[in-house]
Image (spheres, coloured by chain):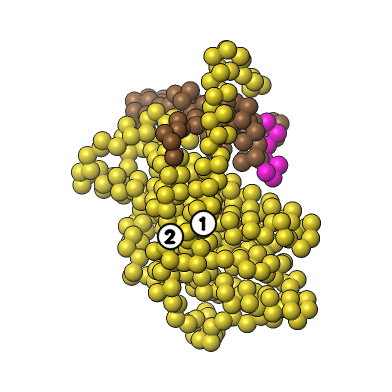
Amino acid sequence: MYSQGLIGAGSENKETPEFLAAFQARIDADEKIEPNDQMPAAYRKTLIRQIGQHAHSEIVGMLPEGNWITRAPTLRRKAALLAKVQDEGGHGLYLYSAAETLGVSRKEMTEELISGRAKYSSIFNYPTQTWADIGAIGWLVDGAAIMNQVPLCRCSYGPYARAMIRVCKEESFHQRQGYEIILTLAEGSEAQKDMAQDALNRWWWPSLMMFGPPDGESPNSDQSTLWKIKRFTNDELRQKFVDATVPQALRLGLSLPDEALKWNETQERYDYGEIDWDEFWNVVKGHGPLNKERVAARKKAWDEGAWVRDAAMAHAKKVSQLNITPIAAE
Amino acid sequence: MVDEEEIPLWEVFIRPRNGLAHRHCGSLHATDSKMALQAARDVYTRRGEGLSVWVIPSVQISASDPQDREEMFDPSDDKVYRHPNFYNIPDDVGHM
Ligand SMILES: [Fe+2]
Ligand SMILES: [Fe+2]
């Protein structure tokens, strides 16, 4: 995005206290930071990490759902799922572009992902065992993603905020198509209802984990809040998600797999049980059910696409040497 | 991975409908303009967002440096006579 030539031009700024204070003053005044602006190295680094992980999550997120495209029960469901998975690919691309404005290359990010060094949302390391899982993912996983992404539309870094606005416009269909799948199953035969309940049982807790570690254990949180990259804490977003989602589950006639879950009259919110953080860290550290398979699938796609990229580059070079005029704009 | 060359970056501009200007909406990687146009269609116009697409290699864009902002743009700040309110027209002349 924008002229890449300038990137890094501002990176030699000395981070004097005056420079840092002036930067913080811009943030406090709700000014957006744009790609070639001077910014503290740590702000750049934080964003590269966060946007990169976000992009990887969209791309890896295509795998569990892609698993069911050929087995969708009707043409209507297949068309919707195909469009949803295509959107997720698009989200990944918007986000990689946003990260590239900070001076990291697409190639570096791809290498991080296919070498297994990159982090992405740990929920995508769980398997999609039944068709009901596709409903649960759209409803819960996209629902949780929306909670996270809506405040990011106001993030201080312009390209990230703009990418999030596009993404959020598209997410609503994702969640609705998921809920419709679960609703149809929940109103179906006994076996279909069981399938919906089983999916909810397996996806509920990992969905709550999507908001990240509890407040106080999240090392980058405070600085990100000061820089207006983050607008709400992990626990605040998790609570909003629980409060929005529990009534939707009740409407389905399904139960949530949490005995401690109950409405708190005085606080006007749902109290919920203890999250198994050992499970969360285990998956984050690479020991989830499908971490290896997910990275291997991305590496396979990348490796098997190499000849296409090579051929396209060779073709472009040949055409430019022959001096053939490209298609003119208007 | 073999040491592959990075596929060039392009900027994408879309006219949402006739009567509006093309507007920058993002970027993508493509080896040539044909691929860039097709990818722009797929990535940025999945829901009727556009009637016309421009793509341009990012390296072809020259941009002002934000650090030169003052010398670039401050000179217009003190030219109040460029604005209609600078001129005194009696009320009885009516709207002008
Ligand atoms: Fe997405
Ligand atoms: Fe989504």
Q: Is residue B10 left or right of residue B38?
A: left
Locate the C terminus of chain A by quadrant. top right
Residue segment shown in magenta: B46-52
Q: Which residue is drawn at 58% across and 12% down?
A: A322
Q: Which amino acid does label 1 sit on?
A: Arg
Q: Which residue is drawn at 54% across and 24% down?
A: A314
Image quarter where ligand 2 lies: bottom right
What kind of element bears circle 1?
helix
Q: How crowded is mark 1: few (under 14 residues within 10 Å), some or many (20 or more)?
A: many
Which chain is in brown here? B
Q: Name the tint of chain A in the rendering.
A: yellow
Identify which residue, B80 or B50, lies in the foreground: B50
Q: Residue A231 carries which label?
A: 2
Q: Which residue is drawn at 41% across and 69% down?
A: A282
Q: How crowded is mark 2: few (under 14 residues within 10 Å), some or many (20 or more)?
A: many
The answer to whether dots 1 and 2 both sit on one chain is yes
Query: In the rendering, at what x and y percent does residue A38 appear?
Result: 32, 38
Foreground disc of the pair 1, 2? 1
Identify the residue under disc 1.
Answer: A294
